[in-house]
Amino acid sequence: MYIAACVRSFRCKTPNALPTCGRSYQARLLDLTHCKRIPGTPTGHLTRMTSSTPGADATKRMATMLTADDADLATAGEMLRKGQLVSFPTETVYGLGANALDENAVLKIFEAKGRPLTDPLIVHVPSAEKALQLLQLHDEAKPIYKALADNFWPGPLTLVGRAHSSIPLTVTAGTGMVGIRIPNHPVARKMLEFAKVPVAAPSANRFGHVSPTTAQHVYSDLGHHNYISIIDGGTCKTYEAGDCSVGIESTVMKIDHERKKLVLFRRGGISEQQLAAVMTGKTDSQSTSLFLGYEIEVLKKVVVHKEEKNPISSTGSKVDDVLGEEAPGQHLTHYAPDVPATLVRVVDKKGSNTSTLESLNIATGVIIDFNGSLLWLKDSCLQYRDLSVKGDMAEAASNLFAFLRWSETVEGATNVYMIDINEDFNAHAHRDAVKDRLFRAASGRIVFIEKSE
């Protein structure tokens, strides 16, 4: 299985060093580095071919498009059981799914996306009963998982726990921990029922690119793969036609019963306020005693790939260098448009770290604003859009990925400037989740400018 993936994705220098299934997961990750990767792709990636890759033919799109009717969803379920990939809409973004119990199928996800093997996948199931079958939970953690599932499933909450032995290590990035959720979307849930297998699915886009909220977004990124089928659940804003109504991915968290912590790996569709309401019994009087002594811990982690200057080597690297993450969505460059993006913070007084508008080339820049904060620059830039003119953070979250996708289509754009959502903005439940996506879309880059009169 790893041999096939490696041969498809790399030009191998030492075939005898190709990984075998009997070895440890970390050793297999190290072995992948014996294969020469294409320059410019982070270490650990299974390199994809896109329409912009030398040798690819942009006119030959081979993905199969499916409708959301029962016949096509049954076909999608059959494809998943046969080891093919299916993209499907959820209430957050479109996912790229594979049979979570089939390691060959799961590897196709990494190959298609160009995703690093150290980035785990979330498994989607149709019921809480199915979820519990895939987890090995401590007795103390079980009632807490059940309480969270009862309150937030189906919905944008991913719960991480020790994976059942039936889950391949590839799904868990070698950690043995797996995130599971039940999507709150009629098309996704019906497809899962037809599939009759748990479905591992990250977002259906090129790794690091803007998450997709329409079938067309998926087709633009992955349509050249003939082993992918895409269920067209419609565009955002029209739930009946397949709305990705939340607009940002699920919240990812685990229960650390030993330290009595709810560890938040990734902010998302379920806010800390919503979790706290369950913990304090505001939604269920029985929850108060269940969560007694527990606290929410936000893991502020940024994963940066080690590039050519410090490549992974089976002879010189520590195993820790290739250890997988317990949860997805922690990479510094994530959700990024194909045009360089930068955060903009407006300051009252000019200082040593402020930039001039001339140095930023605003005239060839695209601005993504919130609540009119950068409206004064509208006439100076190439194109301008506001995530929410009225300052509604939920609307901003719903618009975010669609606007980032739009920004890279503006002809002549050399930069994307995005308002920095900081603590000065309203304390809406999704503020920090939106801020996190913008931060990663900009790879952490930020400029400070003084507002001109």
Image (spheres, helix red, strand yellow):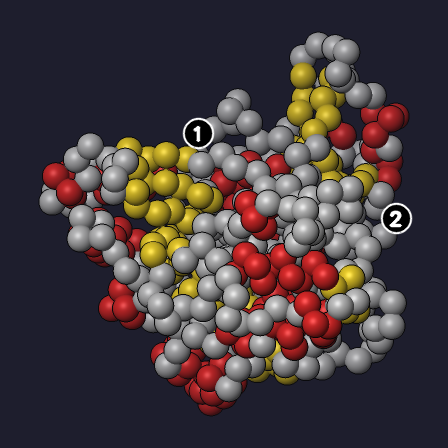
Q: Which residue is mark 1?
A: 427
Q: Which mark is residue 412?
A: 2
The total of numbered circles placed on residues is 2
The one nearer the camera, 319 or 280, is 319
Place of residue 283 in the rendered image (x, y in percent of width and height, measured from the top left): 20, 44
Place of residue 409 in the rendered image (x, y in percent of width and height, measured from the top left): 78, 55
Q: Is residue 364 above or below residue 170?
A: above
- Dot 1: few (<14), some (14–19), or many (≥20) neighbours within 10 Å? few
| Label 2 SS | loop
Place of residue 69 in the rendered image (x, y in percent of width and height, measured from the top left): 47, 83
Q: Is residue 381 left or right of residue 99?
A: right
Q: Residue visible at 83% across and 21% down?
A: 356
Is residue 104 visible from the viewing direction of this image?
yes
The one nearer the camera, 428 or 208, is 208
Q: Is residue 180 above or below residue 61?
A: above
Q: Residue visible at 48% across and 77% down?
A: 102
Report which quarter residue 369 is drawn in.
top right
What amino acid is found at the position of numbered circle 2 in the picture? Gly
- Dot 2: few (<14), some (14–19), or many (≥20) neighbours within 10 Å? few
Q: Residue visible at 63% across and 57% down?
A: 30
Q: Is residue 288 above or below residue 232?
A: above
Of the 4 image quadrants, the one containing the C terminus is: top right
| Label 1 SS | loop
The one nearer the camera, 270 or 42, is 42
